[in-house]
Amino acid sequence: MPGRLLLVAAAAAVVVISTTLGPVPAAGAGLTCSGIVPMRYRYDRISITDFGGVGDGRTVNTKAFREAIYRIQHLRRRGGTLLYVPPGVYLTGSFNLTSRMTLYLARGAVIKAVQDTWNWPLIAPLPSYGRGRERPGGRYISFIHGDGLHDVIITGENGTIDGQGSVWWNMWRQRTLRFTRPNLVELMNSKGIIISNVVFRNSPFWNIHPVYCRNVVIHYVTILAPYDSPNTDGIDPDSSSNVCIEDSHISVGDDLVAVKSGWDEYGIAYGRRSSYITIRRLTGTTPFAGIAVGSETSGGIENIYAENINLYRVGVGVHVKTNAGRGGYIRNVTISDVYMENVRQGLKISGDVGDHPDEYYNPNALPYVKGITVRDVWGVKVREAGLIRGLWNAPFTGICLSNVNIRGWPGPGRSGGRWTCEHVSGAAHEVNPWPCAELASPQHTGSCLNSP
Ligand SMILES: *[C@@H]1O[C@H](CO)[C@@H](O)[C@H](O)[C@H]1NC(C)=O
Ligand SMILES: *[C@@H]1O[C@H](CO)[C@@H](O)[C@H](O)[C@H]1NC(C)=O
Ligand SMILES: *[C@@H]1O[C@H](CO)[C@@H](O)[C@H](O)[C@H]1NC(C)=O
């Protein structure tokens, strides 16, 4: 088994990548997530093959993964342990990670989920959701799962974690799902997480779901699922703080990145916010949103910063979404340096999106939305510039647009010029086409342009 060389190679690759990135705008080009979570070198290493793992694409390796991780958990080697997955296709059922481990996928290594939907284990619903997101009751455990962990790294040489989601998507399409589909990777109540240099494919549901976590770095990842695959969100930081996502490509069937914080009365009662989420140098394609906040926002969402986002063929470029019943707040969100091309709607900020967990939600729990800055946006082939619609009894304030240029489709019948606003105030500076009168209230202009 290759040893320390591997780690050195991976570390070197990271350094090289960060200096050879394509033409990114000056703003933020030099900033990285490094430092949020220290990269650890593990001197204790084991290989999945030491535990009977066979990468022939047919052998089921669930026992090998569970035993290897059991060994890491109970031997507790100083500095943690690296679990090496050599080239080959390792079919397996779901498994749990443990603290102080690195899951290392060699180039050509594929960890592939069995399609055994009937025997897939169940776990309790998240307390901030009160039930599974798509079906009442519990939910299927994520393919790779962790709860209460610290110091976990998933990395390698761009090996693949493949959820083989098609059977799950078909159950959703045929309405035969008994419980909520599994995420590809979910980490709960964990801290000190790095996910880098891995390809994620065909998740049954959301791809990467850090929930109740802090200090999470996700970079140099590729996330792929078909354009028409249902609910295959890329990365959903949920009731988590200090999450940094950068230098990644995501092409999936739902939002590329969606920041969340719990669902209606359950999320309000649990009261865990998402804050300090940074997203930068992301490219992607989706029929839904490029960068999303919401719609589950009941624990509050604040201090979100996204920059250098390149979107091609997306439904909505930037979508901030919430609903009556959610309660909570969305404040201090800045999105800058966005290029979007072939887009249905450039910007959408709306208070009427998403469903409710049950009939016990409180329709008077209104979301509070204040301080959303969108600046330096260039859109081409955009069908509709934007829609900003607050709630009549909870208007959105401090909505600031600056240097936003949205173009329609070239040629006859081109559109793209339209903005719709309602129950909103804020400011607009150098916005083309000119947006709504609601964003011209002079008393807000100063605060807008001074916001970070
Ligand atoms: C994995 O963790 C979950 C809870 O986090 C637990 O319910 C389940 O039993 C664990 N599975 C295994 C195989 O240890
Ligand atoms: C892995 O993929 C990322 C994202 O595409 C890329 O930037 C990087 O060069 C690749 N890393 C390795 C070690 O091949
Ligand atoms: C707004 O969020 C940014 C991080 O995105 C943070 O640096 C800044 O301090 C926040 N501003 C306020 C007033 O909290």
Image (cartoon, rainbow, N blue to C red):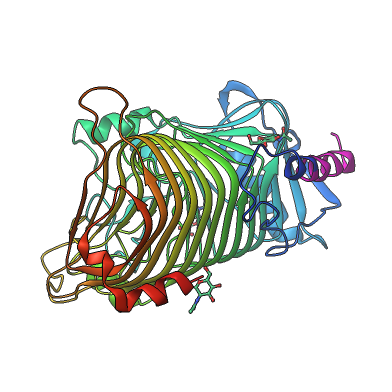
- Please determine whether, in this image, residue 294 is positioned above or below residue 289: below
Q: Is residue 286 left or right of residue 11?
A: left
326 drawn magenta: no
Quadrant of the snapshot with the N terminus: top right
Q: Is residue 426 left or right of residue 161?
A: left
User: From this viewpoint, is residue 432 visible?
Assistant: yes
Q: Give the main secondary structure of the magenta stretch.
A: helix
13 drawn magenta: yes
Q: Position of residue 205 (x, y in %)?
A: 37, 42
Residue ID at (43%, 31%): 225
Q: Position of residue 191 (x, y in %)?
A: 60, 66
- Please determine whether, in this image, residue 154 is positioned above or below residue 349: above
Q: Which residues are magenta?
A: 1-15
Residue ID at (32%, 26%): 410
In the picture, residue 301 is in which quadrant? bottom left
Q: Nearer the viewer, residue 27 or 265?
A: 27
Residue ID at (52%, 66%): 213
Q: How many marks?
A: 0
Q: Is residue 301 left or right of residue 306?
A: left
User: From this viewpoint, is residue 300 visible?
Assistant: no
In the picture, residue 359 is in which quadrant? bottom left
Q: Position of residue 5 (x, y in %)?
A: 89, 39
In the picture, residue 227 is in which quadrant? top left
Q: Position of residue 317 (x, y in %)?
A: 37, 45
